[in-house]
Amino acid sequence: MIGNKAKKSKDWKIIQPDLAIEEEFCNQVPASRIVCRVLLNRGIRTPREAREFLNPSMDNLHDPSLLDGIDRAVARTIKALDAGEKIMVHGDYDVDGITSTALLVRVLRALRADVSWYIPHRQREGYDIRQSGIEEAARRGANLIITVDCGTSAIDEIEYAKRLGIDVIVTDHHEPGPKIAEPLALINPRKRDCQYPFKDLAGVGVAFKFAEALVKGRGYDTEAFRRRFVDLVAIGTVADIVPLVGENRVLTKCGITEIPRSGKPGIQALLKVAGVHGKPITSHMLSYILCPRLNAAGRLDDASLALNLLLTKEEAEAEKLAEMLELQNRERQREQERITLEAIEQITGRCLDEKAKVLVLSSQRWHPGIIGVVASKIVDLFHRPAVLIAIDEANNKGVGSARSIDSFHLFKALMQCSELLERCGGHAKAAGLSIMAEKLSDFDEAINEVADHILTQSDLIPQIEVDAELEIDEITYDLATELQLLEPFGYGNREPVFASRDVRVISKTRLGGNGNHLKLKLATQKTKQIECIAFGWGESEQLFEIGATVDLCYNVQINEYAGFKVVQLVLKDAKPSKST
């Protein structure tokens, strides 16, 4: 197993409140002082902002008509519907692209469109709309291509479509480069001339906005549309690591509520095969249980399997497809473990964690569909941006996936190295690229030169932001329940972290097949006891000798087992108490 070494302690940054502001805020917001402090730490300053954060509602979503180009796109699509033209939805092979495609195809089918879909193969075609996809649309006789989660930078490809007499509508959310495509309509909130108030929608969020405008343009009930499709939006939004604030928070929170009762057989089958059917869904479940299964198809082979799961109306077919995805996900896990170990060996063998601010790693043995999730793991382990590149010997070209830390905007950094790249796209935290193998060394040097001007050594030290210091006696079931109102957690809305000092260890047990984890029982001098689960801390058990006192950073959660619910701490970091 990976991550089975003794833990290194992190820097704790305890956020110090302005007590006067906190007092006034607490008097106006119907929440506990601890939750009020967390809200203030998230930049929420008014009672209205607090109400909207704690009770997200789709009534607070922005009007889709504010998106530049959407009126043109709706008019052209309605023309296609009325004329019975063939429409092809062109998606992407990741979860954001799959859910976007499923959403738009389902909506167009409900509107009686003659619609088909196309997902490029990750290894044979790569990311974005390519000439092969346009030629497939022409072969099918499509007069209109609608892209989801791609297309903003596909300048040559869209010009090629025009020459073939095919109109293209682009719906996308990726950062535009210096030059952008000129389709019939380009709907992207990040486009420089777009005045849409919220810029951070995922690709599925943009597709949702376009579909809503289309449904409204046909005179149908948009409220019913939202309830029916927000489940797909939540899945794609969480998977794409966009900030879970603003509209993303609303869409994810409302979508998570709808997932358990979704009428889509594929979602129900996915819940069953993942072992969470009938359970309340959280963003953590989406990130680590459901989304990896949907992603497995596109990572290893053909994303069509996952898309067919989300499109099918037949329960038996859904169950069969979900089982196939489960097998692929297990294979993905094995391959991910191997690549991660090899990547770590490259880092430690070359002492890159001491030399480089950006970790650029490559191999001919790596599967291009797996390296993205491995890059995320490397960022977690070494707390610096990571670019993993799978090299294809046949054409001497590398396909790369990159992930980053908060202080390094990945896409902007890659654009400063664009002359060395064949192609790149992405956003602040995640990006993809292609590069000729002979340029790898120059790229490594260039991206690290960019990082030298941006990142300080302190940026590379893992840091935990602590929302408040608590006494163990303050941690109650009521508090844990109230903290759940802050869900969904993820990028942009991290789970609240608390700290407690001088906590005594009562007992400890190693858990997991390799003893990687610890289950602790803790107490204060006032004798109140509480359980704590410490994932990945098995090799650091010497810190938790019976009777020792420790300082802890942790999340507060409710653990449900065999019908019982208890408050549980989930360890983030620990240090020996100064009094020890």
Image (cartoon, helix red, strand yellow):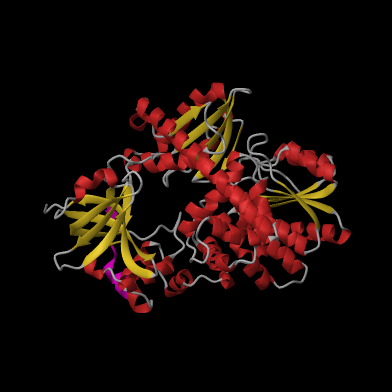
Quadrant position of the N terminus in the picture: top left
71 sits left or right of 349 in the view: right
Rendering coords of residue 226 (x, y %): 64, 68
Q: Does the magenta stretch include residue 20?
A: yes
Please state if 354 lies on the left or on the right of 405 as rendered.
left
Q: Magenta segment, which residues?
A: 13-24
Q: Where is residue 339 in the image (x, y as percent from the top left)?
A: 47, 34
**Residue 470 in sight in this render:** no
Measuring from the top left, give residue 270's x and y in whole percent: 58, 57
**In the depicted view, which residue is nearer to us: 10 or 317?**
317
Residue at 67% over, 47% down: 304
* Total numbered badges shown on the rendered structure: 0
User: Does any portion of residue 406 appear in the rendered image?
Assistant: yes
Q: Confirm whether the magenta stretch covers residue 280.
A: no
Residue 519 versus residue 186: which sits nearer the camera? 519
Towards the viewer: 397 or 334: 334
Q: Residue 458, located in which quarter of the rendered image?
A: top left
| Residue farthest left in this picture | 579
Q: Name the spot of residue 179 as percent of width and height, x first.
A: 65, 40
Residue at the extreme top of the image, as rendered: 438
- Residue sitting nearer the eye, 580 or 180: 580
